[in-house]
Amino acid sequence: MTGKEAVGTLLIAACAIGSLKGQVPQSAQPKQDPTAATATPLAFETVSVKPSPPGSFPFVSAFVRNKTAPIYGLQTMVVPVQMTIAYAYHMQMSEAKATFDKQPSWVKHRIYTQTFRIEGEATHDQVREMLRTMLADRFSLQIHEFTKEGVVNRLVMSKPGVLGSKIKPHPAGANCSTQEDASVGKAPDASTPPVTNCGFSYYYLPGGVLHVALTDTTIADAGRALTSIGVGGIETKPLLDGTGLTGKYDLTLEFRPDSGSPRINPGADDGDAPTLIQALAQQLGMRLESGTGPVRIVIIDHISEPTPD
């Protein structure tokens, strides 16, 4: 996995994290028309979509990774359009893989700088709707979806009610760091006091071991994020929460992200770090069970390269 590919899968993981709670801004309220059959879709105040310069590195707005970050004003994402669609339609990795498998290469690999202005403050669900409007307007995106019975993974407790050492209920009113360089791809400085990073964070430890942390998350949302990291084979099936745990949690996982594939750092000593499946058991007290359940199918009926600004 190349550095850019690793970032890409981790950005999709960020896109998979659950919605932010927030007040509905007055500016984002759709106009009410008693004669209209449906409400007017929410839309950004302004939008710009341009091909990014060659060699551009993908990144997403802070609110995609950090559920507590406010969403307002000018925002920018530098990503392939597949990542925008994945966030806008709240896809798990397995759903995204099936959706984009037969799409043109530019959908998956061409990077666009997408800049948009939000009037007032919006929630994740509202921004998703605004992105869907932008995708329809600028990329002529047409999508339909349905659900069918299929093979799924369920995350369950190894021992009912017994949590592992790396997961605990989120303390009410706890503070966290919102510094980008302290939460995305950069290991903490051992000489400074440790901080708890907001939302989804990750960095590599010596030997290519991946450290992943989620703060103030439901188990269902944590499962969505973990399937999107793209390791351990769990990204090929939807993951459902079967733990019975309610409320919000803080959790960390450290594991080899290259299980079954070439090393990210060949020859490096990973200290016998566990695979993701082993880490779930050892660190969270959870395991995966294969079974049947509802599988969401998202079909792209049409997509075109974006219209110019």
Image: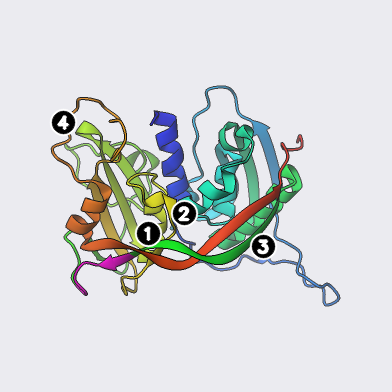
What's the distance in space between the residues labelled 3 and 4, CA to CA? 52 Å
The Cα atoms of the two marked residues, 1 and 4, are separated by 28 Å
Answer whether labels 3 and 2 touch (C-beta < 8 Å): no
Q: What amino acid is found at the position of numbered circle 3 in the picture?
A: Ala
- On whether residue 158 falls in the magenta region, the answer is yes
Which residues fall within the magenta stretch?
155-161
Q: Residues within 10 Å of mark 3 (few under 14, many from 20)?
A: many
What secondary structure is marked by label 4? loop
Check the image and report above or below for 83 versus 133: above
In which image quadrant can residue 2 be found?
Answer: top left
Q: Of residues 307 and 108, which is closer to you in this image?
A: 108
Cα–Cα gap, marks 1 and 2: 9 Å
What residue type is disc 1 on? Answer: Gly
- Residue visible at 27% across and 58% down? 251
Q: Residue furthest top?
A: 54
- Give the quarter of the image for residue 238: bottom left
Looking at the rendered structure, the secondary structure element under dot 1 is helix
Q: Which residue is mark 1?
A: 223
On the picture, is 161 further left or further right than 123? left
- In the rendered image, which quarter contains the N terminus? top left
Query: Which residue bears the numbered disc 4?
Result: 269
Q: Disc 2 to disc 4, how far (Cα)?
A: 31 Å
Q: Residue furthest right?
A: 35
Q: Which residue is mark 3?
A: 28
Locate residue 69, reporting x and y percent: 46, 54
Circle 2: residue type: Ala
Decide: few, some or many residues near mark 2? Use Cα within 10 Å; few <14, some 14-19, many ≥20.
many
Q: Which mark is residue 16?
A: 2
Can you tell which mark lies on residue 82?
Answer: none
Sort mark 4 into few (<14), some (14-19) or many (20+) by Cα contacts within 10 Å.
few
